[in-house]
Amino acid sequence: MQADNASSSLAAFTYRVLIFVGIVALAILAWRLADVLIIVFGGIILAATLRALTNFTVRHTPLQGRWALAVVVLALVALFALAGWLVGAQVSSQLQELFKLLPDAYERTRAWLQRLPIGNELLNFAKSAKEEGSGSLSGVAKVASGTFSALTDAVVMIFLGLYLAGDPDLYRRGALHLVPVAGRKRALLALDASGEALRKWLMGQLAAMVTVGCLTFAGLSLLGVPLAFALALIATLLEFIPFIGPILSGVPAVLVAFTVGPNEALYVVLLYLAIHQIEGNVIMPIVQKWAVKLAPALGIVSIVMFGLLFGLPGILFAVPLMVVVIALVKTLYVDGALEREPAKRRAAS
């Protein structure tokens, strides 16, 4: 009996060590193949979205399998084309006007800040940060290079997402073949748990983005701020990036409001603060009842950790990456090792 208990304890210890070694190895691999892994993860997010829509189509229509996926893809393409036809010209016009307006808005803001004691300090700090961040390439060359790379990565993500959504079981079986036979059941549970967590997070995030965009557009329109639609679109897209995104989305809105007057700029600051208080205390708690709940501290840690590993794309995908990591750790380590060992001890006693 004691020999069995010792053997069981040794097996559990060995399992935990192997899990730890695997996590370290994956972290090193992620650091070495950062660009590739981010593209793959972007494709996985797209595939999860397409599969969620495909499953909804299968449940509510006679379509099955790839026919349902084809209908979903065609419907999304038609939806984007219709949106582009209806509001594309307005969005393009407002964005062009916004880019033309920002230099004048910046000058007005700078002139107002120069009249304040703390304003000069802020301007000097911004100037020194800009000088330190400038490299050998010109700003235009950096933007052009970054844009081309982003477009290429986006195309790869789209095709990867389509292939993964077309036959997810094929790739899931392939991933399971990399795991020893004894651990495949637990690995399958981990894949299913991480996929379900990612789908729930994505649906909740989309709901929050749409709500914040609508509130921003309504508030800016009531305040009479120019280019409210373009600014609301920026707020909607940047809501995907937690903590940092809302701050970045408020900068152009405040600058544009300065072209109307300092009072309007102050009102816009208060508006954005109010919207994100509503988001944090009303919208997200409601969404998290049926989506994934992620502690704010873990959200901040994910931005720092994945930002260091993957750079700007890591910041963009920080929260969904953390959602998947938590699901994997819970299924593989917490449920698989920590909670299984006490259960075995209770059964043995």
Image: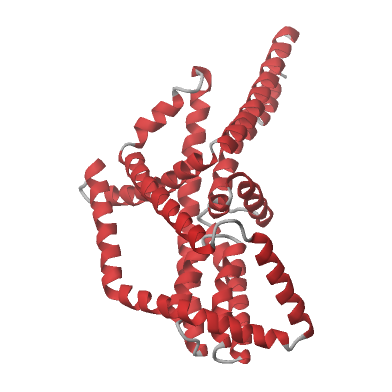
Residue plotted at (73% across, 7% down): 3
Q: Quadrant of the N terminus?
A: top right
Residue situated in front as seen by the camera: 122 or 24:
122
Residue plotted at (46% across, 63% down): 207
Q: Is residue 192 above or below residue 225?
A: above
Q: Is residue 117 above or below residue 210?
A: below
Q: Is residue 250 above or below residue 315?
A: below
Task: For residue 337, say whether it is visible.
Answer: yes
Across and down, in percent, residue 127 comes to: 69, 71
Across and down, in percent, residue 220 comes to: 50, 83
Locate residue 66 relative to residue 271 in the image: left or right: left
Task: For residue 64, say whether it is visible.
Answer: no
Q: Quadrant of the C terminus?
A: top right
Residue plotted at (71% across, 67% down): 128
Among all residues in the image, which is located at the extreme front? 136
Across and down, in percent, residue 135 comes to: 61, 57
Number of numbered callouts drawn: 0
Q: Is residue 191 above or below residue 348?
A: below
Residue plotted at (61% across, 63% down): 244
Residue situated in front as seen by the camera: 297 or 347:
297
